[in-house]
Image (cartoon, coloured by chain):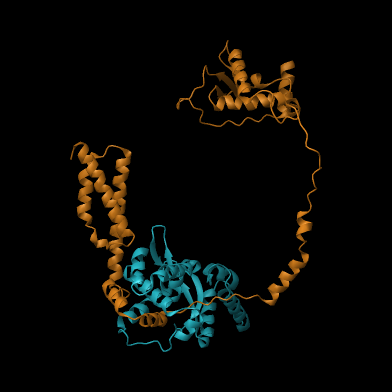
Chain colours: A orange, B cyan
Amino acid sequence: MSGKSGYTEGRERLLGIIDLCKAVESGRHDPFAVEIDDLLQVIKRYFQAWESMGDRCLDAQAINHLATIVELQGSWVKDRSTSLYADPFLIGQKILRLQRSDLANAFLKSWHPVLEHEQISPESLKVAIDYWRSLLPLADRWGGLPEGLESEPGTTSFSDLIKEELVSEVAFDEAIESLWSELKEKCKAEGKIEYWDFIRTNSFFETVRRAYLVSFLVTYRYANLDVDSIEKEMFLSPNVEQSLSVEERQTVSVPIPITYEKWVEGNKVEKS
Amino acid sequence: MSSSKFRNRARRAAHLLFFKRHSKPGAKGWELRRRVGRDYPKVLEFLDETLKPLDLQVKVVSEEGKPLKDLSRTDLEKARFFIRLRSHMSSDEAKMCGWRIDDLAGLAISIAYIISKNGKAPRKDLEDILALKLPGWRVDWNLSRYVRNGYLGEDENGVVYLDWRTLAEVDYKTLVDVLIGTEPGKEELSEDIE
């Protein structure tokens, strides 16, 4: 067994075996129509030709289906050894020869319909009436929301939208770029900077905003976050350009709580 | 336990089994244990005896289709209990229940064919067999009705098998024996149910 043709032929044979087994499993063929020994020989013959993981998975799949057929053969024999066994040929012939009335009569003799009753009791009616009485009208249940103030349509300016914080003055991309440049600038000397030293400013709002933007810098590989778990310190170091290599990709999430108390405490230390 | 208490528990069991509460009628073993008590099999035996004069019986269907005598306590918990007719229906009664002769004949053919195929068969094969005796437009309609009522089940590959209602209502052995033992045309329905 060698060469490309042997490989292709082998895959086709395996797919054929799997299809045959599936047909038997779905009841289209008799389980004993499958020659297990012959098919195992075929699988064995091509085994050396398999190269990839996909080939070996196909091989394992074929073996697995053959095992199912062996199991079906077992239950086939067991079934035929019981008194419940009915020869499919005989049944087929009977179905063809018998009148519809004969068939219906045969069924009636073996049929014991299940009873199923649906009834409303006086007790359940009483519960239902009580519920109905206590139920508020839809208008009362859904009418609770106040109506909005009506005002005439007008115009607004871009600066008003910024004031309302509905749009940002600086585009998000620009903010990220700017922070990345700042990080590169601050790391010029030592190549890294303590995380809190970088994000902390005199405004708590701005500190949180910088932390939020830094999380994007790290996630998208514009910067690295190194955690020193012994000293309990975190350092940021910028990448010269966005790094996308699999080996270097950040694979863990680092939750960093930023509380107002922590920010105040850090500022006090800095001032002292 | 006093007989009045026992009767009271049998009554609770009857309520559970007679009245349909889910999509399927009857009750599971664990439901009966909760409402009737740990010795619910004894209560059901009593209920079965009580129902005898009314030609009704308590029937248990296990998940694996094992006979009652082979069921362990755990099997009983998962098994479903029904109340069903003890003997069988007359053709007139079947007609009153909304079953036409074609429907019953088709169901008999379907069940017998699936039994002969070791419990499952492709829907296409079943359609071909039904089409021998039923008009084409009724074949699909009938098969869908059997599936909808729980007599047959169908998987995503179009393979049809016997479902919970057949297990609960039909005695396979009797069906196959009667089918094989019947000579064509000798046994007419006492009343025309068509």
Q: Nearer the viewer, residue A34 or A100?
A: A100
Q: Report x, y in % for residue A180.
A: 59, 19
Displayed quadrant of residue B125: bottom left
Q: Residue at x 63, y 30 (%)?
A: A256
Where A20 falls versus B112 (above or below)? above
* Whole-percent x, y for residue B142 in the image: 43, 71
Q: Residue furthest top?
A: A189
Identify the residue at image location x=37%, y=78%: B175
Query: Quadrant of the rendered structure where residue A5 is?
Result: top left
Q: Nearer the viewer, residue B102 or B27?
A: B102
Q: Nearer the viewer, residue A90 or A61?
A: A90
Classify B123 as above or below B99: above
Q: Position of residue A41 (x, y in %)?
A: 20, 50
Q: Position of residue A248 (x, y in %)?
A: 47, 25
Task: From the viewer's perspective, tell me whether residue A215 is left or right of residue A65.
Answer: right
Residue found farthest to the left = A1
Instruction: Assign the N terminus of chain A to one quadrant of the image.
Output: top left
Tell me the quarter of the picture where residue A47 sits.
top left
Whether residue A30 is visible to the viewer of this picture, yes or no, is yes
Q: Count every numbered label the image shows and give the total.
A: 0
Q: Nearer the viewer, residue A183 or B143?
A: B143
